[in-house]
Amino acid sequence: MDLKENVTNIINQYSDMVYKLALARTKNKSDAEDVFQEVFIRYMKNYHKIVSDEHCKA
């Protein structure tokens, strides 16, 4: 699986959860969107280090 396909699958799977958690923590839509973006950017940079589905979700 290539990076683009992998990231697309992860975003589809976890986007709602990540956004809801970010919004609950920041209490601000703009900040939650920034956190959401940062989470997936970090995932793209480090996806090769992920060893399990539980690790990915965390």
Image: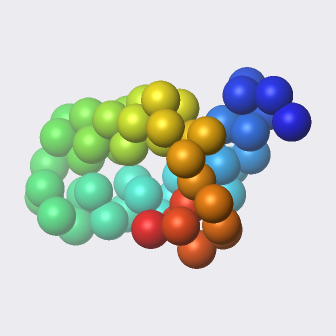
The total of numbered circles placed on residues is: 0
**Which image quarter holds the N terminus?**
top right
- Above or below, comparing residue 49 to residue 53 in the picture: above
Q: Residue at x 25, y 58 (%)?
A: 23
Q: Quadrant of residue 30?
A: top left
Residue 33 appearing in the image: no
In the rendered image, residue 24, in percent from the top left (x then y), is placed at 22, 67
Residue 13 appearing in the image: yes
Which residue is more in the foreground, 38 or 52? 52
In the rendered image, residue 21, in percent from the top left (x then y), is placed at 32, 65
Using residue 8 as the reference point, say whether residue 56 is left or right of it.
left
Q: Quadrant of residue 11?
A: top right
Which residue is more in the foreground, 1 or 13? 1
Which residue is more in the foreground, 40 or 34? 40
In the rendered image, residue 32, in percent from the top left (x then y), is placed at 25, 46
Q: Residue at x 66, y 37 (%)?
A: 7
- Above or below, comparing residue 57 to residue 7 in the picture: below
In the rendered image, residue 3, in percent from the top left (x then y), is placed at 72, 28
Q: Residue at x 44, y 68 (%)?
A: 58
Q: Residue at x 16, y 64 (%)?
A: 25
Give the colour scheme of this rendering: rainbow
Using residue 6 as the reference point, say whether residue 17 is left or right of it.
left
Using residue 57 as the reference point, say whether residue 51 is left or right of it.
right
Judged from this view, the residue extending furthest toward the bottom is 54
Judged from this view, the residue extending furthest toward the right is 1
